Image (cartoon, rainbow, N blue to C red):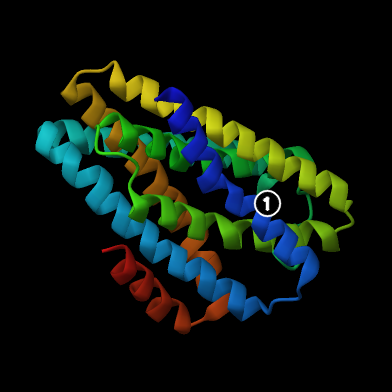
């Protein structure tokens, strides 16, 4: 099952490679990228709610789940702040990474974004119900515009395509390992501990959405981002 979890983690993260290749081959408008990202925001929020938080509440008390959400949010917030200082602030900017952004910062920042998503896929397998199609789809859709925008930005800033491809493939591999780790942690834990871990991942993902994905989607698609977000939520439901 660990191998299966790693496989689904690779599938969910494969959107990073696909998004990069689409960015190389096509010149998608800023609004199109924003709409795709907003759709992913809605789908991911829906999956977090119904695939992570609700099952956690059924296995553990509100206090434990709330604590997991809070610690997950704080962990992502602190990690993201440190990576911004290392030069990863402009990693999703399709107009070119901001001044001061570095290749290492962009790589680390994208890994930070992807680890909770992949771990969640592994956790969903540990419940014994198989991988959640809604969650897998939401993660794939959320990864696609992220890679699309970041690839356009890095290429505009002069990063060679070979380096960009190697970066995305490396992150895909890390995502597969994260999914396997997520499965291992939940499968050997008690129901209450597993619920806490799921809540932790949910908190990290929600913070990532609010800090990065949603603002970026709105900056690109303006008011239409709200409608696209709702459509993504409806589809996942």
Which residue appears at 32% of the width and 37% of the height?
A: 124
Residue in front for this viewpoint, 22 or 97: 22
Which residue appears at 56% of the width and 73% of the height?
A: 34
- Whether residue 102 appears in this view of the structure is no
Q: Quadrant of residue 189?
A: top left
Q: Is residue 208 left or right of residue 28?
A: left
* Other residues around mark 1 within 10 Å, as few (<14) / some (14–19) / many (≥20): many
Q: Is residue 60 left or right of residue 217?
A: left
Residue 91 placed where, x, y %?
68, 53
Q: Where the N terminus falls, by quadrant? A: top left
Q: Quadrant of residue 112?
A: top right
Q: Which residue is mark 1?
A: 17
- Up-down relation of residue 2 to residue 210 (above or below): above
- Whether residue 6 appears in this view of the structure is yes
Residue in front for this viewpoint, 230 or 99: 230
Query: Total number of numbered labels?
Result: 1
- Up-down relation of residue 218 to residue 214 (above or below): below
Q: Is residue 53 left or right of residue 60?
A: right
Kind of element beneath mark 1: helix
Residue 151 placed where, x, y %?
74, 58
Which residue appears at 68% of the width and 79% of the height?
A: 29
Q: Residue furthest bottom?
A: 223
Residue 20 placed where, x, y %?
71, 57
Residue 140 placed where, x, y %?
50, 54
Q: Where the C terminus falls, by quadrant? A: bottom left
Which residue appears at 17% of the width and 30% of the height?
A: 64
């Amino acid at each position: 099952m660990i191998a299966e979890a790693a496989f689904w983690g690779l599938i969910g993260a494969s959107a990073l490679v696909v998004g990069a290749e689409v960015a190389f081959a096509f010149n998608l408008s800023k609004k199109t990228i924003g709409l795709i990202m907003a759709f992913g925001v809605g789908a991911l929020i829906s999956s977090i709610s119904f695939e992570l938080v609700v099952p956690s509440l059924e296995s553990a008390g509100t206090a434990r789940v709330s604590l997991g959400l809070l610690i997950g949010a704080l962990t992502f917030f602190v990690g993201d702040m440190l990576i911004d200082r290392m030069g990863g602030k402009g990693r999703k900017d399709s107009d070119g990474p901001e001044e001061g952004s570095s290749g290492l910062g962009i790589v680390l920042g994208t890994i930070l974004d992807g680890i909770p998503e992949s771990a969640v896929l592994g956790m969903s397998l540990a419940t014994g119900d198989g991988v959640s199609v809604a969650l897998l789809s939401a993660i794939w859709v959320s990864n696609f515009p992220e890679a699309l925008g970041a690839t356009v930005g890095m290429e505009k800033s002069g990063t060679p395509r070979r380096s960009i491809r190697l970066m995305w493939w490396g992150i895909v591999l890390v995502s597969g390992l994260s999914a396997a780790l997520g499965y291992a942690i939940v499968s050997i834990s008690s129901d209450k501990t597993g619920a806490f871990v799921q809540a932790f991942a949910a908190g990290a993902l929600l913070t990532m959405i609010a800090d990065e994905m949603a603002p970026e989607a709105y900056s690109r698609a303006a008011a239409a981002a709200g409608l696209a977000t709702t459509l993504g939520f409806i589809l996942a439901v």
